[in-house]
């Protein structure tokens, strides 16, 4: 490739990068929602009406709400088929007869619970029984302020998942994203199931590319608050934010290291955008690469020893991997224009966006052990900015399939797609948190 052509290619990619970075897309049709049909090796669980210990206060209201949330969590986990109630609420039936009826309906375990109010605290007492033997196989009590009833339900759901799978569930995780319903790009946070949306910034500026810290206490993002794309950190525990990197030019949020002590980002510093490693105070520790090409969108491997990123070294944006020292750079072979890779928490896969010539952006998964690439979306307009759930079983992403930019969730095989929530304005750039403990 001669030098003039290479310069044109770089200018073209810079333009594409800028468009992807700032522009709102054109949006399309046909939402696909999560199927609740029984498939695969899911456990059949019965969830009985939760009992209110005292009908004179709000216990009955919370009993109904907690049951609905836990049922929904179990369904969304895709580990369970929730068997519908065999009796009316409050119907007097002997316990052994109940177990027999639940067994006839296909349930293998039964979840029961009682709800009471202790001062300003809500108390949830849960029990799980083996339907055949009638033996108690698990019980636990939860206590929290009534305002946190959703968190308490998610906590119980995660424990149920752990009892069945050995892995903690993801019901206590959240998703941060960008939305423009105020006419500006602001950060919002929402529970993984689409509830409890909350606005995080009120700048009247452009805030983009949010990313979680490994402990779930902080979010880094790029902001034009001071009219330059600077890197900020928002501490959710202390409700405080500060600026980390404010070099002239691009300071594009990338990825926290696995220990949360370092940050990978893209800096232009008046030159081609390249990758840098900084500490959480903004001090540059290392320039990862130095060349006449553009390197963006870095994501750490869960082992902390490798990085996946995007580079235009061949003349168009492609997937690359290198070690944390900046060496052993190798390309992952793909056929289109790639963007926004994210390394699975399980370490074996990378999800990314790719566009074929004259096509839309679709989501793909690169399986590292086999080098096999699987396409997850097709003919649904643009699908971008994928990130993983903390258990590596789901992906959240942006899509304009409905006619505007919205946030969706799907399983890693591309099935069970659901819209996260009905949110005014256009949303993009989701990032999924780890499981949160507060």
Image: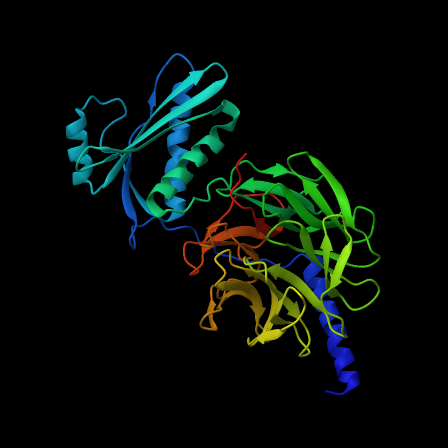
- 130 or 46, nearer to the observer: 130
Q: Quadrant of residue 94?
A: top left
Q: Going 26% across and 22% down the picture, which residue do you hit?
A: 90
Q: Quadrant of residue 312?
A: bottom right
Q: Quadrant of the N terminus?
A: bottom right
With respect to residue 169, does 404 lie above or below? below
Q: Going 82% across and 67% down the picture, which residue do you hit?
A: 271
Residue 262 in the image: x percent, y percent?
A: 68, 53
User: Horizontal placement of 162 versus 386: left or right?
Assistant: left
With respect to residue 397, does 314 lie above or below? below
Q: Residue furthest bottom?
A: 2
Can residue 180 be seen in this snapshot? no
Q: Residue furthest top?
A: 56
Residue 43 in the image: x percent, y percent?
A: 28, 46
Residue 36 in the image: x percent, y percent?
A: 35, 48
Q: Quadrant of the C terminus?
A: top right
User: Horizontal placement of 434 versus 271: left or right?
Assistant: left
Identify the colour scheme used.
rainbow
User: Horizontal placement of 261 versus 91: left or right?
Assistant: right
Residue 212 in the image: x percent, y percent?
A: 61, 48
Q: Going 79% across and 63% down the picture, which residue do you hit?
A: 268
């Amino acid at each position: 490739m001669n030098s003039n052509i290479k310069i044109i290619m770089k200018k073209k990619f810079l333009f594409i990068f800028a468009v992807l970075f700032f522009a709102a897309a054109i949006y399309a049709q046909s939402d696909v929602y999560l199927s609740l049909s029984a498939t695969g090796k899911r456990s059949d669980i019965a969830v009985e009406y939760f009992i209110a210990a005292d009908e004179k206060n709000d216990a009955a209201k919370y009993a109904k709400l907690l049951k609905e949330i836990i049922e929904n969590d179990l369904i969304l986990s895709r580990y369970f088929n929730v068997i519908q109630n065999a009796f009316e609420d409050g119907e007097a039936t002997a316990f052994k007869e109940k177990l027999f009826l639940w067994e006839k309906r296909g349930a293998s375990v039964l979840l029961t619970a009682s709800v009471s109010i202790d001062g300003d605290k809500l108390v949830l007492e849960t029990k799980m029984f083996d339907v055949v033997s009638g033996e108690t196989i698990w019980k636990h009590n939860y206590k929290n302020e009534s305002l946190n009833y959703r968190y308490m339900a998610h906590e119980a759901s995660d424990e149920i998942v752990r009892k069945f799978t050995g892995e903690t569930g993801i019901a206590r995780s959240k998703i941060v994203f960008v939305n423009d319903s105020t006419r500006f790009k602001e950060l919002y946070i929402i529970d993984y199931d689409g509830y409890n949306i909350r606005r995080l910034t009120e700048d009247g500026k452009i805030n983009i590319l949010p990313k979680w810290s490994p402990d779930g206490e902080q979010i880094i993002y790029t902001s034009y608050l001071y009219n330059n794309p600077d890197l900020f950190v928002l501490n959710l525990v202390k409700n405080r934010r500060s600026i980390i990197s404010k070099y002239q030019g691009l300071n594009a949020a990338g990825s926290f290291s696995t220990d949360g002590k370092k940050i990978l980002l893209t800096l232009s510093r008046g030159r081609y955008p390249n990758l840098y490693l900084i500490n959480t105070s903004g001090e540059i520790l290392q320039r990862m690469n130095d060349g006449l090409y553009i390197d963006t969108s870095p994501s750490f491997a869960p082992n902390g020893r490798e990085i996946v990123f995007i580079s235009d070294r061949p003349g168009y944006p492609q997937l690359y991997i290198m070690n944390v020292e900046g060496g052993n750079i190798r390309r992952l072979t793909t056929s289109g224009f790639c963007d926004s890779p994210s390394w699975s928490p399980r370490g074996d896969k990378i999800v990314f966006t790719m566009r074929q010539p004259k096509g839309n952006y679709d989501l793909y998964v690169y399986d590292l052990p086999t080098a096999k690439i699987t396409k997850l979306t097709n003919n649904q307009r643009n699908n971008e900015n994928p990130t993983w759930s903390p258990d590596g079983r789901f992906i959240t992403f942006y899509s304009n399939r409905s006619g505007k930019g919205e946030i969706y969730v799907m399983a890693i095989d591309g099935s069970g797609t659901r819209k996260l929530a009905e949110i005014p304005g256009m949303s993009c750039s989701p990032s999924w948190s780890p499981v949160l403990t507060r």
